[in-house]
Image (cartoon, rainbow, N blue to C red):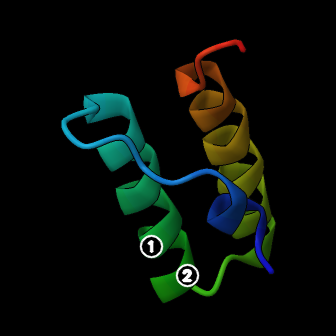
Amino acid sequence: MSATASAPMTPGCAECDDLERSRKQAVTDRDLSKVTDFRVLIARHRARHRVPS
């Protein structure tokens, strides 16, 4: 399971969309270091969307 699978995208979040687009571009460019970096950034960003219980 990837790091991004644990926290779903928030609809309408421009930053989520931008990070995901950048990750996909890194995949296309075959830049695995950037892919990993974006996965971490996406996971950190999406964690901020969670509402504390």
Q: Secondary structure at mark 1?
A: helix
Q: Identify residue type, mark 1.
A: Lys
| Image: 1 above or below 20 | below
Q: Identify residue type, mark 2.
A: Val
Depth check: give the residue in front, 33 or 47.
47
- Residue shown at the point (45%, 73%) measured from the top left: 24
Depth check: give the residue in front, 52 or 44.
52
- CA neighbours of label 2 inside 10 A, class few (<14), some (14 to 19), many (20+): some
Q: Are marks 1 and 2 in contact (CB under 8 Å)?
A: yes
Q: Secondary structure at mark 2?
A: helix
Question: Where residue 40 is drawn, which disc sits there?
Answer: none
- Residue 7 position, x and y percent, is 62, 51
In the picture of the structure, the residue carrying the numbered disc 2 is: 27
- Residue 49 position, x and y percent, is 53, 24
| Image: 38 above or below 36 | above
- Residue shown at the point (60%, 30%) measured from the top left: 45
Give the quadrant of residue 11. Answer: top left
Q: Quadrant of the C terminus?
A: top right
Q: Residue furthest front?
A: 53
Question: Where residue 24 is drawn, which disc sits there?
Answer: 1
- Residue 16 position, x and y percent, is 40, 41
Query: Would you say 19 lies left or right of 50 here?
Result: left
Query: Would you say 48 lies left or right of 14 here?
Result: right
Inter-mark Cα distance, 1 to 2: 5 Å
